[in-house]
Amino acid sequence: MKCMIVEDESPAVKILQKHIDHFSDLELVGIHYNAIDAFTSLQQNLVDILFLDIELPKMSGIELLKALQNKPAVIMTTAYREFALEGYDLEITDYLLKPISFERFTKAIAKVYKSAKQPLDVQYNSTPDESLLSSPFIYIKTEREYRKVLLEELLFVESIKNHVKLVTEDSSSITLMSLAEIEERLPRNYFLRIHRSFIVSLSHISRFSQTHVVIKDKVIPVGRHYKQQFIQWVEKNTL
């Protein structure tokens, strides 16, 4: 199924691209940063799925939809929840609130497949929670090459300005990426963000309190904004 992204924010485009890459039968055929260019392209090319931001320069996503004669399946994306009702009035397939998680993205694609009566074909077993079994490593770019990082060896990820440092049992690597971007690539049953600057491997936590966790000799703080989800994990995994 051919996909097009219409989005004026580069980080959002990158997240959608990564999500699309996990589906073997989705093909990204176009990226446009404004609705006018997208409208021209849609007159000349057949597209099955349109990922459409609502707030765009020159012409809004809603205005673009109203101008289209033959609409593909439309998945709207926005940071503003209040626009959802207007989008549904235009018979869109789904509505995604930024930042878009892979789990929520998969549900939206499943709706498209259901309406097209096609089976869902994702390279993960079904959700990122199970990806440690089917894809036990990730590649990250370090300087001039890509390096494989085994997830079972990854201890924690630390944000350093606009980079992240991935620390394993034997080494560490730094790559140009935000913590939110690396969080999207890690299986949630195995990794948890506990601080604005840290994601930790749950299986490598040796001891913890409500204020910190310890992995090897590293003491990592639990941020107050992340404490509730950390406590929920603790309640599930303690006697």
Image: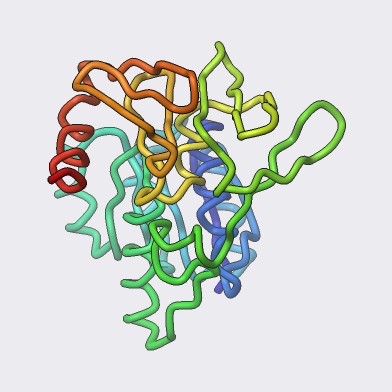
Image location of residue 162, percent across then percent down: 58, 16
Give the image quarter of residue 232: top left
Q: Is residue 38 visible?
A: no
The answer to which of 239 and 65 lies nearer the viewer is 239
Residue at the extreme bottom: 117
Image location of residue 10, percent across then percent down: 56, 32
Residue sitting at 16 percent across and 33 percent down?
A: 231
Q: Is residue 83 left or right of residue 222?
A: left
The answer to which of 34 and 48 lies nearer the viewer is 48
Give the image quarter of residue 228: top left
Residue at the extreme right: 144
For the N terminus, the image quarter is bottom right
Residue at the extreme top: 161
Q: Is residue 92 left or right of residue 178?
A: left
Q: Is residue 119 left or right of residue 84?
A: right
The answer to which of 57 and 145 lies nearer the viewer is 145
Residue sitting at 39 percent across and 78 percent down?
A: 113
Residue sitting at 22 percent across and 22 percent down?
A: 209
Image location of residue 219, percent across then percent down: 41, 16
Q: Is residue 148 visible?
A: yes
Count the numbered circles shown. 0
Residue sitting at 55 percent across and 69 percent down?
A: 123
Give the image quarter of residue 180: top left
Image location of residue 207, percent across then percent down: 32, 29
Q: Looking at the image, is 208 positioned above or below residue 223?
A: below
Q: Looking at the image, is 5 positioned above or below residue 221?
A: below
